[in-house]
Amino acid sequence: MNDSVYELCTLHPELKAVMKEAGFKNITKPGMLETAGRIVTIPKGARMMQIEWPHVLDILKAHGFDPVWKGEKR
């Protein structure tokens, strides 16, 4: 969750559609991922878009993603 949206969507292209479903409607606009997405993390984007964090986590988990923070031990 510490990686930028751009990095995560590059590793997991299907994440872009999942994020749109979670409320990140601008993520599919041309150039958005390549510009703002390079510096914004998912939590920061959720705050900016005023999307409730539990909602984002629920959507990610429903699509098989298991959000972790860098350095978090599993």
Image (spheres, grey):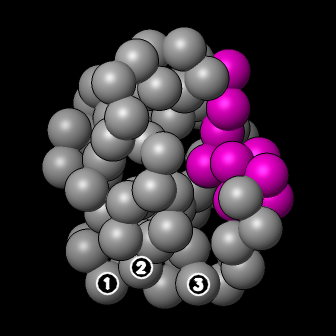
Residue under the point 28% across and 30% down: 11
Q: Which residue is denoted by mark 2 in the rendering?
A: 59
From the viewer's perspective, tell me whether residue 1 is left or right of residue 5: right
Q: What amino acid type is highlighted by mark number 2?
A: Ile
* Total tally of numbered discs in the picture: 3
Residue at the outermost left position: 14
Residue 1 location (% of width, % of height):
61, 47
Highlighted range, magenta = 39-48
Real-space Cα separation, disc 3 to disc 1, in angstroms: 11 Å
Overall secondary structure of the magenta section? helix
Dot 1: element: helix
Indicate whether residue 40 is drawn in magenta.
Answer: yes
Q: Which residue is denoted by mark 3 in the rendering?
A: 55
Residue 49 location (% of width, % of height):
71, 58
Q: What amino acid type is highlighted by mark number 1?
A: Ala
Residue 26 location (% of width, % of height):
48, 45
**Which dot, 3 or 1, sits closer to the camera?**
3
Residue 3 location (% of width, % of height):
59, 31
Residue 36, placed above or below residue 28: above
Of residue 69 and residue 71, the one placed in the foreground of this image is: 69
Residue 47, placed above or below residue 69: below
Of residue 73 and residue 53, the one placed in the foreground of this image is: 53
Of residue 19 and residue 10, the one placed in the foreground of this image is: 19
**Residue neighbourhood size for the residue with mark 2, other residues' Cα within 10 Å, grouped as few (<14), some (14–19), many (≥20):** some
Residue under the point 66% across and 84% down: 54
Q: Which residue is denoted by mark 1 in the rendering?
A: 62
